[in-house]
Amino acid sequence: MKSFTEHLTFTTKNRRDYLNITATVEELLRKSGIREGLCLVNAMHITASVFINDDERGLLQDFDDFLERLAPHEPTSAYRHNRTGEDNGDAHIKRTVMGREVVIAVTDGRLDFGPWEQIYYGEFDGRRPKRVMVKIIGE
């Protein structure tokens, strides 16, 4: 069995943002040479997420609106976590809701998606560099 690992770094201009990283992960799969196996894509920060869904702007705005209603950024005093000097208690909750990672089957050298599925990096406390790990294992 082969293993391939690469780290991506994202720095968003906004506190919250959603980046379609499917093409980047597909390129890493090609680079790995693995034809059958599994691909893990994992956010390496506790205020960021990796998830799979449709690449549709309205849906992404719906996610953002839902998350902001669920855990609004302000007032920052509403979060006990922020008593540590941070202002990102909401971002930790948003990450937990959206998830840490995805695993995609690799079949015949391609990511084995269902209809419309795309890989997203979700940022909930942006404006600084954050890593995503891509690990592909298989033959």
Image: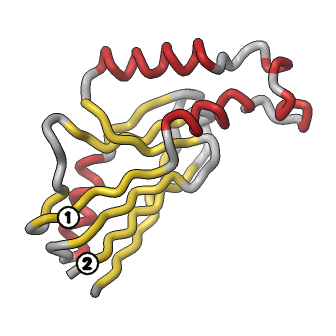
| SS label for mark 1 | strand
Q: Amino acid at mark 2?
A: Gly
Q: Mark 1, residues whose alpha carbon is within 10 Å: few (<14), some, or many (≥20)?
A: many
- Percent across and percent down for residue 67 are 54, 21
Q: Is residue 64 above or below residue 1?
A: above
Q: Which residue is mark 1?
A: 106
In contact (CB < 8 Å): disc 2 and disc 1: yes
Mark identifier at residue 56: none
Q: Is residue 15 above or below residue 111?
A: above
Name the element at disc 2: strand
The residue drawn where x is 40% and y is 41% is: 51
Residue to which mark 2 is pinned: 138
Residue 92 in picture, x, y percent from top left: 66, 37
Identify the image quadrant of residue 124: top right
Q: Amino acid at mark 1?
A: Val
Q: Residue at x 17, y 35 (%)?
A: 116
Left or right, 118 with respect to 74, comes to: left
Quadrant for the C terminus in the image: bottom left
Judge from the rendering whether residue 125 lies leftward or rightward of residue 5; answer left or right: right
Say whether disc 2 or disc 1 marks the residue closer to the N-terminus.
1
